[in-house]
Amino acid sequence: MGRVVLGMAVSVAVATCAVAAVVVGRRVRSRRKWKKIVGVFRELEEACDTSVARLKQVVDAMAVEMHAGLASEGGSKLKMLLTFVDNLPNGREGGTFYALDLGGTNFRVLRVRLGGRRSSILEHDVERQPIPQHLMSSTSQDLFDFIASSLKEFIEREEDSSDHPLEKRRELGFTFSFPVKQTSMTKGVLIKWTKGFSIEDMVGKDVSDSLEEALMRKGLNMRVTALVNDTVGTLALGHYHDGDTVAAMIIGTGTNACYLERTDAIIKCQGLLTTSGGMVVNMEWGNFWSSHLPRTSYDIDLDADSPNPNDQGFEKMISGMYLGDIVRRVILKMFLESDIFGPVSSRLMTPFILRTPLMAAMHEDDSPDLTEVARILKDIIEIPDVPLKVRKLVVKVCNVVTRRAARLAAAGIVGILKKIGRDGSGGITGGRRSDMKMKRTVVAIEGGLYTSYLVFKEYLHEALTEILGEDIAKHVILKVTEDGSGIGAALLAASNSSNNVDNIQLL
Ligand SMILES: Nc1ncnc2c1ncn2[C@@H]1O[C@H](COP(=O)(O)OP(=O)(O)O)[C@@H](O)[C@H]1O
Ligand SMILES: O=P(O)(O)OC[C@H]1O[C@@H](O)[C@H](O)[C@@H](O)[C@@H]1O
């Protein structure tokens, strides 16, 4: 009997040791996997460093590249495009104008009624709709027929409500949020597509002609009296309401900026004369590049997978089309490195499946158990049951990617201010602290990333103050203009159409 009991005791002991070994082994493996995931995060954090010192290098690089882009064609990755907008709306514009606003995600049709007195936009109706994805890679005719049809329907609804006497010849402002080499205020050819567009037959074609041909096909007798980039429309509206507005930045699906430049600084266009002595320059800053930019392996891979590789390097680090995908790539690496969650889902391998608004929702999840993070990981990238401590790490990844983006955008803005001597220093040539009284400086801002992602906005403002210092930063005001790019285009159509003689001086 004793032997049996002993045998059982030994068996139990052996089994217990075996179980313990398995448990300990699992714990060791789990701890090792956790360490790997944390290692991926730490590496990301380090690679995304945006210290004030580094941001100031980016500021200087932006200002230098602006100079280079103005000095000669192709002198910089910054195209520094002429807009032929040399007089901004002065508030005396009157009448009803239409505008079309083609962005990277959304398309807007607007009707704006102007009262002819300063800052009196009597009314504006806007219809906004997402651009059908398939059109982004279809033909130019398909795209412009879609735009013309939308405008025709919008106008026909207006006729039904017929409280607006129909203009005999309707004039149109066209906001086109892509790089265009303009030959006048109303004409310009597409240089290249950016963001998610890739309609090959459109490159090199005149954008206004393409639109007017589509309008004719729809029986609409309308003329484009202003072809503008969305940053220029935003600047026009910003300046219409606040004369201290010197620049505009868009941070939506893509990103870009424009500003008021002196014609004598636009060296590549010798002899450029304007009534105001200045002209708005569309920087196309999404294409900015500098070795000081904190680029990671995720940025390199994203660029390789994008429709426009080796292009728009700055945009791909800071704008709405891309932030969510950077985070997805980091999560993917964590899973591959640790296989802690079993087989990787095919969705986690799919570019752009994690849209930035969803990434923002994870980042801003303030529930104690991060239930929104769990839901998005499960529903969007098909990874169920992610442990809470990993969900917390995912939120930290969102934070690092968003903080880098916002701080780089702030550095870009200060780069513009430095170029025009509004950053409190002596400008690019002076290089010494100027004792001049810092002028009130307004930058108009638009775009879903800034207006809908509070954390991004807060990080951007924080970085502006860190770079400029409190004393200077308090003179720099960022103002959001709702539907600015579209209304601004209508304003510019009005100012160009009425040929106002007494336009406001630019500088
Ligand atoms: N809540 C949000 N959080 C973060 N990003 C957002 C949010 N809403 C929109 N966005 C970003 O803004 C972009 C849309 O910007 P918007 O300026 O409205 O349109 P468009 O780029 O077509 O001009 C989206 O592509 C998305 O990346
Ligand atoms: O308004 P969106 O779609 O975010 O566009 C912002 C910028 O996106 C860039 O990709 C374009 O080259 C710019 O011209 C544009 O201004």
Image (cartoon, rainbow, N blue to C red):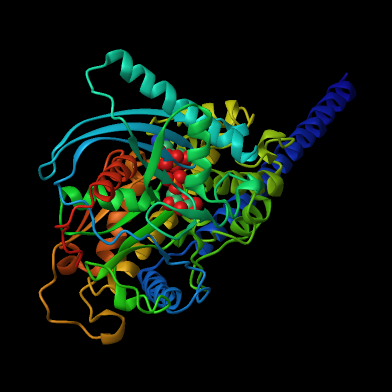
In this rendering, is residue 212 above or below 62? above
**Does 218 sit above or below residue 332?**
above
State whether residue 334 appears in this view: no
On the image, the x and y values in percent for residue 370 come to 45, 31
Left or right: where does residue 482 sit relative to residue 344? Answer: left
Relative placement, left or right, of 21 versus 154 is right
Total tally of numbered discs in the picture:
0
Evaluate whether residue 424 shows in this view. Answer: yes
Q: Residue at x 54, y 31 (%)?
A: 145
On the rendering, which quadrant does ligand 1 occupy?
A: top left
Looking at the picture, tell me which residue is in the foreground, 394 or 257. 257
**Quadrant location, the C terminus:** bottom left
At which x and y percent is residue 430?
Answer: 26, 86
Nearest the eye: 449 or 191: 191
Residue for point 68% across, 55% down: 304
Where is residue 276 drawn, in percent x and y? Answer: 21, 67
Outermost residue toward the top? Answer: 160
The quadrant of the picture occupied by the N terminus is top right
Seen in the image, is 83 located left or right of residue 481? right
Front-lying residue, 170 or 401: 170
State the image quarter where residue 108 is shown.
top left
Q: Position of residue 269 (x, y in %)?
A: 40, 75
Left or right: where 6 falls relative to 53? right
In this view, 340 is above or below 148: below
Q: Could you say which is closer to the camera, residue 499 or residue 418?
A: 499
Decide: is 234 above or below 80: above
